[in-house]
Amino acid sequence: MAIIENGTATHIQKNAKQDRFRGHDYYNIDDLLDTEHILVRDAVREWVKQEVSPIIEEYSERAENPRHLVKGLAEIGAFGPSLPAEYGCGGMDEMSYGLIMQELERGDSGVRSAASVQGSLVMYPIYRFGSEEQRKKYLPKLANGEFIGCFGLTEPNHGSDPSSMISNLKDDGDSYILNGAKMWITNSPIADVCVVWAKDEEGVIRGVILEKGMKGLSAPEIHGKLSLRASCTGELVFEDVRVPKANVLPNVTGLKGPLSCLSKARYGIAWGAIGAAMDCYDSALRYSKERVQFGKPIAQFQLTQKKLAEMITEITKAQLLAWRLGTLANKGKATPAQISMAKRNNVHMALEIAREARQIHGGMGITNEYPCMRHMMNLETVLTYEGTHDIHLLITGMDVTGLNAFK
């Protein structure tokens, strides 16, 4: 692919690779969607075909974040799509939000992560737990992509157990002094706004809003990732950062604040993983019809048909799970445990399909001519973040037994 320079961003000519994807709906689930849902999904699908698919393999190979996509993500309403329009957000329902995440992750998990973090982990807590002044100050600029946001919960020594965090806030008159560190933070090196969770002097978890340039705040980038390579990941380090009390989220205390944000993000992941799975299936189906061995397309062999039949079966089951979850979410009835089940099932499903699709492509499957290996590597991370595969299993176990395996 030829590379051209445009200001500070490196762009790749978009005529280099054609996106031949078509949707897969074996159970006619589109019949269960409103016209608006289909219009939103198809618009985002077309945007991904035009803007993401032709360039994503090169960006992933170079481990470079395609920051020029931010404007387009804002224009298609990918930042906070289900938050109120009065703050510059999409004002759509939860089903539309899920479908947007599905189409973005069909392009790349890193692109979906950028939108998911911005909307679910930064804009959502400001909207739900922030003051009206905070909403008006931050949400419109986050929605239009002028601001990039990140979310600080995971720490170097505290991942699945966020209640043990050591980042702390000490009262200092009209401000707090923040010390500590966060790890594996999407967008932190490029973030203008950081929603960070830390304990006050009474051990109560509080959310605060940090802004780029605050003295003592740094965000070193993490290098050497073999997954989510087109996503920008880093740390957040706090060394006596002075946080005005006006930057504290006033309407929440305790772990329920960050966990509710994670439920919002996990909901989007449950949809997003379907997109990655469909992309792998679509590529494998097409390749199997075109690849001839022993005098016939490999799609005619029984074992290939077994793989493809199992793929579309699992995708269909995941689509139905996500659709039902979306209807519950629209009614405000989707529980965190139900969201955990969908996130765990659908990501695992997508990862298995990526692996099987890679096999159908044979040796070509390990090249960037096809998307399977990139999706596979990305999904290894998606399986772990926003709650690990095993943690979500225990959440379901606790929900059905009433017994807490975490204690």
Image (cartoon, rainbow, N blue to C red):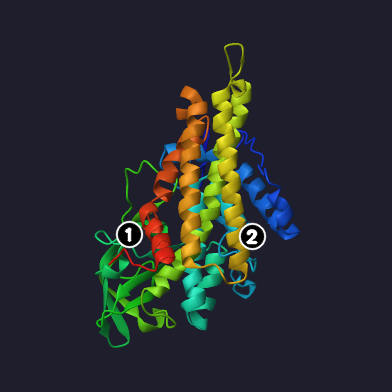
Q: CA distance from mark 1 to mark 2?
A: 33 Å
Q: Residue furthest bottom?
A: 173
Dot 1 amino acid type:
Ala
Residue 96's tag is: 2
Of 186 and 75, nearer the camera is 186
The residue wearing badge 1 is 219
Residue at image location 58% in from the left, 33% down from the top: 308
Task: Residue 203: name its quadrant.
Answer: bottom left
Q: Is residue 53 visible?
A: no
Of 130 and 253, nearer the camera is 253
Dot 2 amino acid type:
Ser
Q: Is residue 218 left or right of residue 359?
A: left
Residue 307's tag is: none
Confirm or deny contact between disc 1 and disc 2 (CB under 8 A): no
Of 401 and 359, nearer the camera is 401
| Secondary-structure class at tag 2 | helix
Question: Where's residue 172, x and y in %?
Answer: 26, 85
Q: Is residue 202 visible?
A: yes
Q: Is residue 164 left or right of residue 318?
A: left
Question: Where's residue 313, x and y in %?
Answer: 59, 41
Task: Residue 22: name its quadrant.
Answer: top right
Badge 2, how many Cα within 10 Å: few under 14, some, many 20+? Answer: many
